[in-house]
């Protein structure tokens, strides 16, 4: 008899978010500074992906409407790994087009939920493009899993016991919301009762619920099935750190301020004069000093950050962005949203879809930042020249921004809906110009 394991509630929420116009996949790319053959890549994926993390050889089936993991009876690594070549001239534009095509293609729901391509003819060597469904793990963890393909990378460990306390209070609140449906959002007596039951957690959840939808803008609205992808030239991490010291800000503050400035400039260039847009920012709930556990899974919360895209003065924008980030750091919002995700999967399908749309309407984009290795890694004895990843979006959200540091370089990548972001490299250029403006405002430069 096939052994089945119940999909964790938080993971099941991401499984249910998958839609034709927004496949719930994290897409990553590692490119090499020299040749690497297919046999080596196959062996690395078999030993450091499938053997380490059993879910890479499992599929999802439904048992009484609840998703369950079971071993994929037809699993064959060669069905998930293919080889192809970029069209000439094999540069950034051709790779962006290929990544966008992969991001637009849903994974087979009846098989193990990942796919990899060894792409020949890219810059100094081949590239490995990997698409992994969000149900396996969150983007931060999956980026670490891909980096864990490195020679000598640490083996995974068992998942520690989950946190208690505030997260449990948030879970109670989310279950209560699911039990009484959207009426909770309109009945002050229900909200008051929740506040008495769970104190501060209730107040934070109440604030999140009461928050109005994000304003209309060019990056929100009806989505199509075609995605776009782009990324910026590497930015030396030392430059970002130096700028942060001059402006009394963290690296994250600087990178987010450049995003607010750049996105504002991009929208104004298209005639959109919106003053503020919110983004979901994932917050990792796993210690980064521990390997990703064998069980994988989504262990992150989400916080809402308002980006002051209407502020055009670099120093004013950074000061305001830093103030907002400092406030968020003191908030339990990430634990509460994680609890909501856990509870959401246990609700009826129609209400779960309503919740996804309800919370998705409060933001216009997803923004995530992943710290990578400080020194270059090798895979199969070949040095990895660069690393990038792209995050999926949900609901009507049409833009995802991902930032990763690797070997002393920072890269920003754009994932978007082709209707919402038809020219992603224009957004990349606006981001680069915004960072330069921040440097100028601090009395420095490249």
Image (cartoon, helix red, strand yellow):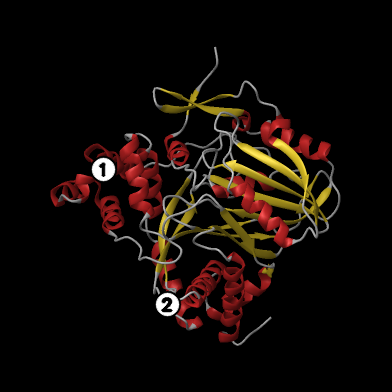
Marks 2 and 1 in Cβ contact (< 8 Å): no
Helix, strand or loop at label 1? It is helix
Rendering coords of residue 28 (x, y %):
65, 50
In this view of the protein, can residue 407 be seen by the observer?
A: no
The vertical placement of 114 against 386, above or below, is above
* Res 187 label: none
In this view of the protein, can residue 434 be seen by the observer?
A: yes
Q: How many marks?
A: 2
Rendering coords of residue 126 (x, y %):
80, 50
The image quadrant that residue 429 belongs to is bottom right
Compared across the picture, whether 368 is left or right of 446 comes to left
Helix, strand or loop at label 2? It is loop
Residue at left 40%, top 73%? 274
Residue at left 24%, top 37%? 179
Compared across the picture, whether 52 is left or right of 441 comes to right
The vertical placement of 294 against 255, above or below, is above
Residue at left 38%, top 41%? 164
Question: Which quadrant of the figure contains the N terminus?
Answer: top right
Residue at left 35%, top 66%? 215
The vertical placement of 112 against 410, above or below, is above
Question: In this view of the protein, which residue sits in the foreground, 136 or 339?
Answer: 136
The residue singled out by tag 1 in the image is 177
* Res 310 label: 2
Q: Alpha-carbon distance for marks 2 and 1?
A: 35 Å
Rendering coords of residue 311 (x, y %):
44, 79
What is the residue that sits farthest to the bottom in this orientation? 443
């Amino acid at each position: 008899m096939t052994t089945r394991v119940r999909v964790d509630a938080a993971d099941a929420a991401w499984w249910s978010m998958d839609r034709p116009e927004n496949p719930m996949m994290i897409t990553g790319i590692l490119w090499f500074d020299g040749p690497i053959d297919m046999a080596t890549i196959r062996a690395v994926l078999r030993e450091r992906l499938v053997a380490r993390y059993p879910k890479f050889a499992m599929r999802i089936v439904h048992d009484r409407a609840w998703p369950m993991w079971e071993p994929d009876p037809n699993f064959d690594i060669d069905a998930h790994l293919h080889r192809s070549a970029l069209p000439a001239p094999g540069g950034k534009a051709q790779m962006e087009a290929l990544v966008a095509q992969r991001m637009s293609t849903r994974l087979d729901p009846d098989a193990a939920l990942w796919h990899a391509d060894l792409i020949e003819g890219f810059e100094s060597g081949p590239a490995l493009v990997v698409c992994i469904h969000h149900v396996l793990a969150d983007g931060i963890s999956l980026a670490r899993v891909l980096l864990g393909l490195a020679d000598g990378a640490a083996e995974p460990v068992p998942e520690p016991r989950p946190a208690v306390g505030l997260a449990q209070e948030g879970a109670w609140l989310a279950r209560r919301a699911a039990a009484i449906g959207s009426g909770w959002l309109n009945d002050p007596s229900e909200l008051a009762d929740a506040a008495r039951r769970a104190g501060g957690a209730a107040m934070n959840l109440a604030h999140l619920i009461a928050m109005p939808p994000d304003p209309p803008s060019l990056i929100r609205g009806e989505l199509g099935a075609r995605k776009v992808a782009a990324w910026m030239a590497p930015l030396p991490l030392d430059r970002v750190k130096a700028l942060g010291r001059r402006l009394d800000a963290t690296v994250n503050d600087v990178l987010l301020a450049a995003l607010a400035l750049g996105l504002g400039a991009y929208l104004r260039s298209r005639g959109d004069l919106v003053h503020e847009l919110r983004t979901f920012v994932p917050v990792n709930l796993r210690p980064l000093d521990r390997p990703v556990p064998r069980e994988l899974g989504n262990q992150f919360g989400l916080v809402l950050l308002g980006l002051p895209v209407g502020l055009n003065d670099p120093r004013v924008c950074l000061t305001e962005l830093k103030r907002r980030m400092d406030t968020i750091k003191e908030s339990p919002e990430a634990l509460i949203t994680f609890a909501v995700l856990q509870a959401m999967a246990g609700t009826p399908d129609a209400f779960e879809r309503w919740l996804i749309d309800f919370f998705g309407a409060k933001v216009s984009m997803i923004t995530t930042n992943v710290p990578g290795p400080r020194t270059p890694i090798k895979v199969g004895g070949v040095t990895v020249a660069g690393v990038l990843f792209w995050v999926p979006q949900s609901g009507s959200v049409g833009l995802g921004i991902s930032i990763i540091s690797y070997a002393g370089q920072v890269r920003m990548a754009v994932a978007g809906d082709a209707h919402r972001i038809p020219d992603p490299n224009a957004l990349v250029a606006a981001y680069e110009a915004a960072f330069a403006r921040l440097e100028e405002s601090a009395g420095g430069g490249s």
